[in-house]
Image: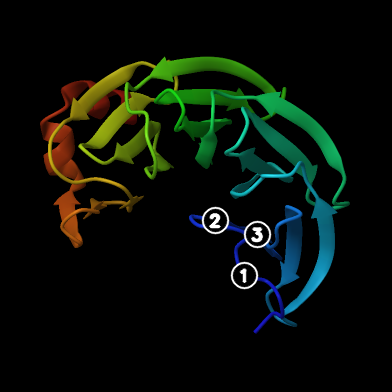
Amino acid sequence: MVPAAGPADREGGITVSSDSVWLVIDGRSTLAKIDPNALVIRQRTVLPRGSLNAIYSGGLVWVTRPSGAQVTVVDAGTGEIVGSVRSGPNPRFLDAGAGSVWTLNQGDGTLTRINVQARLTTGASSLRTPGHGGDIKVSRGIVWTTMVKVPLSATDGRTGKVLCQWVGPGGDSLGVSRNAIWLTDYDAGDVYRFGLDDVLAHCPAARRARSQ
């Protein structure tokens, strides 16, 4: 067990690179680089106060700041902060895919797209899902998001166009595998498995985007 390496706040996130585990561990918003074999912290980077969730992509660690409207970019090798990119308001959860980092913004229910190479915001999609909680996963060209009462949204990872939304009970966190979507119902305390082909059959636009 790594000493003093728990998440800094509720709904804190964790990410991995090829040789390390990363998470923000304290109230000072310290990003810890953990050696998974020795179980020791190899590197610490102090981020803007309130930073919380991280994702590794392209040799960089991207960390949201839910109390603001930004993503801090850290060089995974040196631990140096190399940039800050604007997002929508109150980004908490994020994922990487389709050449971009995507943030789910709790403040206004939007999805922000950040180009990994340029480290610039390149677009925003209106999901109309503001509020606490939620989750985001990118898989095979589709950005999947969830929020309570809007349990699933599918956005084209190439164009940023919202392709389909399912409205009703359920939602809050999700996982996407090669052949299934796993979705929680926060209010009921349940977990559901949906065949990915079945979901795509109800959203032809997402099926087409996934095949491109």
What amino acid is labelled 2 in the image? Gly
Query: Is residue 168 shown left or right of residue 22?
Result: left
Figure quadrant of residue 59: top right
The label on residue 46 is: none
- The residue located at (62%, 40%) in the rendering is 64
Q: CA distance from mark 2 to mark 3?
A: 8 Å
Q: In which quadrant is the C terminus drawn? A: top left
Circle 1/circle 2 CB separation < 8 Å:
yes
> Regarding mark 2 in the picture, which secondary structure is present there?
loop
What amino acid is labelled 3 in the image? Leu
Q: Nearer the viewer, residue 92 or 77?
A: 92
* First reached walking from the N terminus: tag 1 or tag 2: 1
Residue pointed to by mark 2: 12
- The residue located at (70%, 61%) in the rendering is 26
In front of the other: label 1 or label 3?
Answer: 1
Residue 77, percent from left and from top: 84, 53
What amino acid is labelled 1 in the image? Gly
Residue 3, percent from left and from top: 72, 80
The label on residue 6 is: 1
- The residue located at (31%, 40%) in the rendering is 146
The answer to whether residue 29 is above or below residue 146 is below
- The residue located at (20%, 37%) in the rendering is 149
Q: Nearer the viewer, residue 209 or 181?
A: 181
Q: In which quadrant is the N terminus drawn? A: bottom right
**Dot 1 alpha-carbon crowd within 10 angstroms: few under 14, some 14 to 19, many 20 or more:** few
Residue 17, percent from left and from top: 66, 58
Q: CA distance from mark 1 to mark 2?
A: 9 Å
Say if residue 212 shows up in the picture. no
The label on residue 23 is: 3
* First reached walking from the N terminus: tag 2 or tag 3: 2
